[in-house]
Amino acid sequence: MKISQIILVASLISLSVQLLAEVLALAKPLAPKGWNILMATTGDLNKDQMSDVAMIIEKQKNDIIHKNEDGKIIHDNPRKLIVFFKTAQGYQQIVENSSIPVAEQPNSCLLDPLAETEGVVIKKGNISIDFSFFMSCGGWEWPRHNYTFRWQNQRFDLIGFDYNSFHRASGEETSKSYNFSTLKSKEILGGNMFEDTQTQTKWSTFKAPQQLTLKNINFDDFYTQFEY
């Protein structure tokens, strides 16, 4: 790598760290007392040219201590997603969701669903939320979920859901994308992580069982609301 490239990479890293620090400094006063900010993002969500805030927080202390069969304390502190709009009077909380998956499940090999993800990000005026469901034992599939919400009709409607998974032994991929605005889905068939394969794209229509929003969605058990 050339020196100029090294300098560019170092500058980008430094800028990213600076921007992250600025976002956290902005979000910290908005977090409820007794909660830690796991991740935060800023951007204009309601097209008023003001920088809004979305954050995922975790309770510092659990009300009830849970332990595994071996006596180890489980890190299952409650988590929330909170969104604030910036107004002329300051920041106003708009919505809160308490179904963010916890870091550890009892007697489970599931890793923290927020690990190795972007978590919550504001992109193109929408809220994007990622979860990764990696099992260190007891399962070969590695599913990843992505949700996209848009502010419309005075609420954050779910407009997109992507489900991607691959089998860590065979490499077989599952890729499904659902557009809740058009009620059309796209599935890519025949993909494989380990080899070049001929894939096919299948388009379908689907019915949403209810109007899913950032307020009523259950991230921890989404399949009970929508069978993907």
Image (cartoon, rainbow, N blue to C red):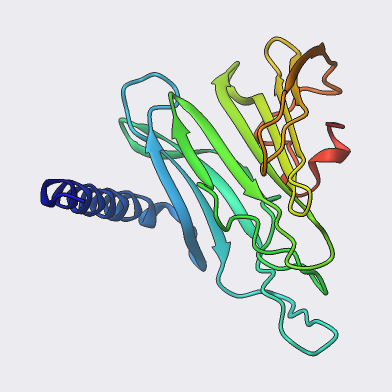
Q: Nearer the viewer, residue 79 or 168?
A: 168
Q: Residue at x 85, y 16 (%)?
A: 207
Q: Nearer the viewer, residue 22 or 164?
A: 164
Position above or below: 220 against 95? below
Q: Residue at x 60, y 25 (%)?
A: 155
Quarter placement of the C terminus: top right
Q: Position of residue 37 (x, y in %)?
A: 47, 59
Q: Position of residue 100 (x, y in %)?
A: 66, 51
Q: How many marks?
A: 0
Q: Nearer the viewer, residue 122 or 131?
A: 131
Q: Residue at x 81, y 81 (%)?
A: 68
Which residue in the rendered view is the most extreme toward the front?
196
Position above or below: 110 against 92? below
Position above or below: 112 against 162? below
Image-based side of 84 in relation to 23, left or right: right
Which residue in the rendered view is the most extreme toward the bottom?
71
Q: Position of residue 205 (x, y in %)?
A: 82, 11
Picture quadrant of residue 219: top right
Q: Position of residue 214 (x, y in %)?
A: 65, 34
Q: Residue at x 81, y 12 (%)?
A: 204
Picture quadrant of residue 25: bottom left
